[in-house]
Image: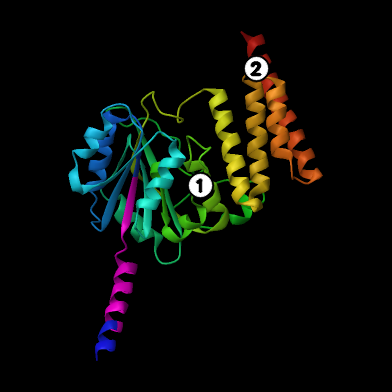
Amino acid sequence: MGKESATAERILAVRDRRENPLVSILVNNYNYAAYVGRAIQSALEQTYKNTEIVVVDDGSTDSSRAVIEGFGGAVRAVYQGNGGQASAFNAGFAESQGDIICFLDSDDVFLPTKVARVVEAIGTFDTWCFHNIQWVDVNLGTIATPGIPFETGSYDFREQLVGGQCRFAPPATSGLCFRRELLSRLMPVPDAIKITSDNYLKYSSLAIATGHYLAEPLALQRIHGNNAYTGRTDSMLRANVQLATASGLRSKFPSLRPVCSRMFANGLAEKWNAGESLSAVSAAMREYLSGLPLTEQAELLARTGYKAMRSFRKKAALGTSK
């Protein structure tokens, strides 16, 4: 009778975990004391209650720690030296215990039903759930937001990604959610990807698993002038992000070489056109090309040259028209 009771309890526990999974909300923060409190509060205000909130402060030098500590035991805080977004993602995941993981940038806000909708959508089979995000200003006022032209539903982009192209452009960090089993295959994110580490998670997850997209805005993304990437026009920054992401993805997922090579070529061309020296561009190229088949090396070189020349001609045309 004792064994039967223990078995029944295990069955009930598995069923409860499946129907009412623990959701970890991972908040990554660096010097956003003005915003992180509202982000944490939005995580606490979720209508779905079986959650844990893990806040990773990545070496902030402002008053972020005091804000985070103000929430007491309602959150689990991790304080570390400044290592970049990838390092914060890795630390948060290591600290978490949830069956489903939702990422939240500390200057963004979850809408109250976000986690409930994700748990419902991700179901039994899908391994990732991405959703639309509404752009807002510093005071959370709605502003124009680039759309994602896909309807709600389950998708399989693996063939497109492995082939080097994909029409789907996933949302930013606060719109990304994953089953733990999938993240365990993707993590850790390479530490070299200091910002926009979400790109690594987006492309790797799309390439190896099916998932669900919700065409509804379940989070607010602040566009406030100090964003690390969104809205920035710094060509060198964007180029370095592409190079780091491409190298990181390629090192862990060799099957993604086609899409990585395209991304790397685009980054090299943008870096060159942003004023980087030819010797520095050549050095980066040589390092990436090592180990690639000759056909892929030739394709990457051709694509880099084409992209660089196209960008140069565009700039020249703009200069002539002024």
SS under mark 2: helix
Dividing the picture into quarters, in which one does residue 282 lie? top right
The x, y position of residue 197, in whole percent, is 48, 40
Q: Is residue 90 left or right of residue 272?
A: left
Residue depicted at 23% across the width and 56% down the height: 49
Quote the CA–CA distance across marks 1 and 2.
31 Å
Q: Which residue is mark 2?
A: 315
Q: Which is nearer the eye, 60 or 104?
A: 60
Category of crowding for the residue at label 2, using alpha-carbon neighbours closer than 10 angstroms: few (below 14), some (14–19), many (at least 20): few
- Circle on res. 144: none
Amino acid residing under circle 1:
Lys
Q: Which is nearer the eye, 55 or 301?
A: 55
Above or below: residue 103 compared with residue 231: below
Category of crowding for the residue at label 1, using alpha-carbon neighbours closer than 10 angstroms: few (below 14), some (14–19), many (at least 20): some
The residue stretch that appears in magenta:
7-26
Kindly give the residue lying farthest to the top in the view shown. Answer: 322
Q: Which residue is mark 1?
A: 202
Residue depicted at 61% across the width and 40% down the height: 246
Q: Per the image, is 21 magenta?
A: yes
Kindly give the residue lying farthest to the front in the view shown. Answer: 81
- The answer to whether residue 166 is visible is no
Above or below: residue 129 compared with residue 312: below
Dividing the picture into quarters, in which one does residue 27 lie? top left
Above or below: residue 302 compared with residue 257: above
Q: Per the image, is 17 magenta?
A: yes
The tag earlier along the polypeptide, 1 or 2, is 1
The x, y position of residue 151, in whole percent, is 46, 51
Tell me whether circle 1 and circle 2 mark residues in contact (CB < 8 Å): no
